Image (cartoon, rainbow, N blue to C red):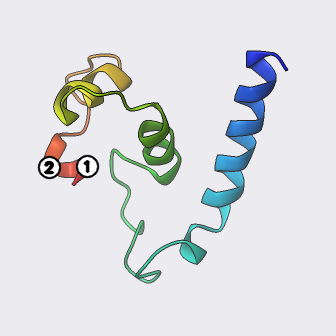
Amino acid sequence: MTHNKIKSLFVSAVQSVTSSISEYAVNPDKDFTRDGKLSPDKLISFLVSEGSSTTKNELLDFFGFDHQSPSASAFS
């Protein structure tokens, strides 16, 4: 299986989960209702790809060192 096929399957699985995110939320009426910097699909992708560095550094790396990237406290 090629890496493109694996990536495609992963993106499809993430889209499936995020399309019905309220089913996976602890508080469906409150969780993921704001339009923040960490959307459900970005959060899932970040958690899967996160390495062993600090959360701050991992977020900067994930968002391409953009100064508008979410903070570590936003992640928490």
Going by the image, does 3 lie left or right of 28? Answer: right
Circle number at residue 32: none
Along the viewing direction, whichever of 51 and 60 lies nearer the viewer: 51
Check the image and name the residue furthest to the front: 52
Tag 1: residue type?
Answer: Phe
**Which residue is painted at 47% across and 80% down in the image?**
28
Q: Rounded to the nearest whole Å, what is the CA distance between mark 2 and mark 1?
A: 5 Å
- Binning the other alpha carbons within 10 Å of mark 2 as few (below 14), some (14 to 19) or many (20 upward) gives few
Location of mark 1 (residue): 75
- Quarter of the figure with the C terminus: bottom left
Is residue 8 placed above or below 45 in the rendered structure? above
Cβ atoms at labels 2 and 1 below 8 Å apart? yes
Q: Residue at x 27, y 20 (%)?
A: 66
Residue occupying image coordinates x 14% and y 49%: 73
Q: Residue at x 53, y 47 (%)?
A: 41
Q: Label 1, secondary structure: give it.
A: helix
Q: Is residue 20 above or below residue 13?
A: below
The quarter of the rendered structure image containing the N terminus is top right
Asked if 24 appears above or below 73 in the picture, the reply is: below
Q: Position of residue 62 (x, y in %)?
A: 37, 25
Q: Examine the image and state in which quarter residue 68 appears.
A: top left
Instruction: Say which quarter of the image contains residue 30.
Output: bottom left
- Percent across and percent down for residue 29 are 43, 83
Say which residue label 2 marks: 73
- The residue nearer to you, when weighing 76 against 18, is 76
Residue 6 appears left or right of 72: right
Residue 53, given in percent of the width and then of the height, sits at: 23, 25
Q: Amino acid at mark 2?
A: Ser
Residue 26: x %, y % from top left: 42, 79
SS at mark 2?
Answer: helix
